[in-house]
Amino acid sequence: GGLKFTVVEAATGAIGGKFSHEFMVVKEGDENFIGEETLVICSKCGYSANIEKAECKYPDEQTNNKEIEKKLEEVYTPQMRTVEEVSSFLKQPKEKFIKTLVYVTENKEEVYVVLVRGDYEINETKLKDVLNVNEIQLASSELVEQIFGVPVGFLGPVGLKTTSQKYKLKFVADYSISTIKNAISGANKIDYLLININYIRDFVVDIIADIRNITANDICPRCKAKNSLKFSKGIEVGHTFKLGTKYSKSMNATFLDENNKEQVFIMGCYGIGISRIVAAAIEQNHDEDGIIWYPTIAPFTVYILPIDYKDPEIKNVADNVYKLLKQNNIEVLLDDREERAGVKFKDADLIGIPIRLTISKKLLPDKLELYLRQTKQKSVVYINELLNRINESIVYLLKF
Ligand SMILES: [Zn+2]
């Protein structure tokens, strides 16, 4: 029971090391679940990863494209800026296009021309990893024009030149561009495209690597199954890192082993998002009336709701029940406000304490109503059996 989470392979980011796992709160079957991370899960083998990390593999048929390489040609495409527009104009699928993007480092000294197939998205985490830089950003359209003298929509990998020697260019391509035959991309000239572009014959790159996001059309990186990948949103609440000897080596942190030989420590570390867990738990466990706290993380276990706290008999029982629970180490909240009963019921549902005790004239002097927020079950209990009923209820709620 409790917070439902899944453990996924993750990118290590600035901390480094090769292996890390994120603990993600997810909600199966809820497509509207809010999460800042996108996870990919294989329904065949159970592989799961953050898309920042999920590796893109190629099925063999994709690398066996037998199309004959045609002659490079310029095509006039007035007023067309997007892949979509040109794709419908030339009646060619997006898979035929090479998208040309420009990234710069924070100090704008390094300029990276990044190439990916038209239907794919660049994965900036992978890109940073490949380039071995911590920060990178898409160049603004002004900067692109300044560097190349051409708007970004007309850039292409063939014959791309800078306006000044001061810009140091590096060409970085995703593997996906290497298998396109007779590709289409910008001609580095306003309103013109180049068609029949072929990698190696017409251009080369400095780095070719996996730098794109995995898609539903990809094969599973682990079991290579087709059509098995599903995507879902997740909220990251924890992250473990296997650091290995990355830090111990550089800081010379060693110990003597049983043979009196110096060895470097093998390290790991983790982080838990305490306050995120609260938000994620609410996102995962709520209904139209409010929060449904799981007993182990609820701020209180019991909510006492006296229908009318000004009534001496009700007040007396409410205060005594409050004391009794306190004495028995049960975390309890007493609603002693002078509000209408309806307001208190609404608020009790909204803040979602697992067990609500309603004290009303009609059940006094010896009984009250016990209500479970999770299941909406109500029962009438004798006050002298209350502690047992509460403990049974907690055990029952822990099964959810
Ligand atoms: Zn798989």
Image (cartoon, helix red, strand yellow):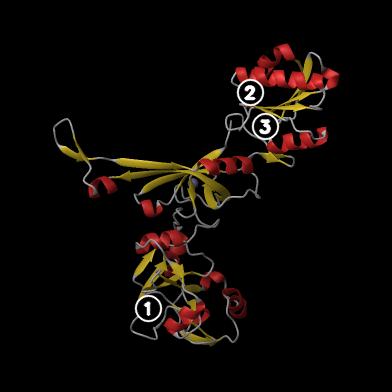
| Relative to 44, residue 392 above or below | above
Q: CA distance from mark 1 to mark 2?
A: 70 Å
How many neighbours does mark 3 have within 10 angstroms: few (below 14), some (14-19), or many (20 or more)? many
Q: Amino acid at mark 2?
A: Ile
Residue holding disc 2: 394
Query: Which element carries disc 3, helix, strand or loop?
Result: loop
Q: Amino acid at mark 1?
A: Arg
Query: Which element carries disc 2, helix, strand or loop?
Result: helix
Among numbered discs 1 and 3, the one appearing first in the sequence: 1
Residue drawn at x 65%, y 20% as measured from the top left = 325
- Nearer the observer: mark 1 or 2; the answer is 2
Query: Which element carries disc 1, helix, strand or loop?
Result: loop
Residue drawn at x 58%, y 78% as measured from the top left = 86
Image spot of residue 105 (x, y percent)? 39, 69
Residue holding disc 1: 201
Residue drawn at x 36%, y 85% as measured from the top left = 164
Q: Is residue 189 left or right of residue 233?
A: left
- What is the quadrant of residue 25 in the picture? top right
Kindly identify which numbered label has been placed on residue 353.
Answer: 3
Q: Is residue 361 left or right of residue 32?
A: right
Image spot of residue 355 (x, y percent)? 69, 27
Q: Residue furthest left?
A: 260
Task: Out of 226 and 83, give the one closest to the viewer.
Answer: 83
Image spot of residue 37 (x, y percent)? 53, 52
Among numbered discs 1 and 2, the one appearing first in the sequence: 1
| Relative to 361, residue 89 above or below | below
Asked if residue 332 shows in the view, the reply is yes
Q: Is residue 348 left or right of residue 65?
A: right
Q: Are marks 1 and 2 in contact (CB under 8 Å)?
A: no
How many dots with numbers? 3
Task: Out of 101 and 57, give the one closest to the viewer.
Answer: 101
- Quarter of the rendering occupied by the N terminus: top right
